Amino acid sequence: MDKFLKKSRPREAEEQPDADAAAASKVARTSAASGSDAKPLAPEVASLIEHLTDPQWREALRGEVCKSYFAQIARAVSLERGKKTVFPPAPEVFSAFNLTPLPEVRVVVLGQDPYHGPGQAHGLAFSVARGVAVPPSLKNIYKELQDDCPGFKPPQHGHLAGWARQGVLMFNATLTVRRGEANSHAKLGWQDFTDAVIRVLDARTTPTVFILWGGFAQKKGKMISRTRHKVIEAAHPSPLSVTKFRGCRVFSKANEYLEQKGFAPIDWAAL
């Protein structure tokens, strides 16, 4: 997080990393105590979780991956991959967390379900792999950025890793999907896992921006503290609700809050 602080920073900002580490550790211990049995991980769990490589996220979520529901997720995804095509590829399921380590999270964008078309999903919500056509929702996001942030020019791709590397955590509520079948993994248990992710983020003392687009994300984000963090709600950028989405100014609002708290703004054009 230090690399995102402005040169002149408030005293509380200097103390936040240690406090956040303690908060994340407390959530992990509570999670572990409520559902883990200290047994070795099942092979399917070990195979799935090996792709979560960021050490801070692994520590913060270690209690969750020991719970029975996570074992059920791992088994179900493993069985699906043996019979069907599942997106994103296994090494990219946790890309959002690997690209944005927990101490560096400044902005959170919550999606619902991975893209289910060939080559699209790569582990970041709203983002697609390079060489894939920019989806309609992301086109609408780019258009809002043009109107909201002077100088922004939409790139010719939809790969948002440039935001992730600046501390923008973009993850879906469900982390996998069957090819061509939207929300096909929504009931596997991923919702419980991503609720735990939100609890970890909410427990931090570092002021964080949560961008919640649409009713689904807003309902899932009810647990987020409005006193410790900044929650920005708006309509979803989908073509079905784009007229309500236009003019939401979430990107400039996010940067205004970050600067008020002593952090550097996100360079939304750095893609």
Image (cartoon, rainbow, N blue to C red):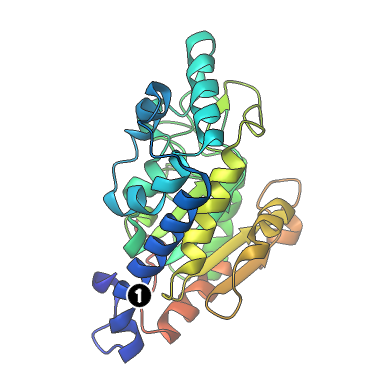
Spot occupied by residue 69 in the image (x, y as percentages of width and height): 56, 35
Q: How many marks?
A: 1
Whether residue 172 is visible here, answered yes or no, is no
Taking the spot 54% from the left edge, 75% from the top edge, the residue there is 253
Using a 10 Å C-alpha cutoff, classify the residue at mark 1 as few (fewer than 14 neighbours), some (14 to 19) or many (20 or more). some
Question: Toward which corner of the image does residue 10 lie, by quadrant?
Answer: bottom left
Question: Toward which corner of the image does residue 224 lie, by quadrant?
Answer: bottom right
Spot occupied by residue 127 in the image (x, y as percentages of width and height): 48, 43
Depth check: 107 or 152 in front? 107
Whether residue 40 is visible here, answered yes or no, is yes
Depth check: 219 or 192 in front? 192
Taking the spot 40% from the left edge, 25% from the top edge, the residue there is 42
Furthest toward the top, the residue is 83
- Provide the secondary structure element on which disc 1 rests: helix
Quadrant the N terminus occupies: bottom left
Spot occupied by residue 212 in the image (x, y as percentages of width and height): 62, 60
- Is residue 31 depicted above or below 26 in this figure? above
User: What amino acid is labelled 1 in the image?
Assistant: Ala
- Is residue 84 depicted above or below 220 in this figure? above
Taking the spot 53% from the left edge, 75% from the top edge, the residue there is 229
Spot occupied by residue 210 in the image (x, y as percentages of width and height): 55, 65
Side (left or right) of 135 relative to 154: right
Instruction: Read off the residue under disc 1.
Output: 19
Side (left or right) of 215 relative to 50: right
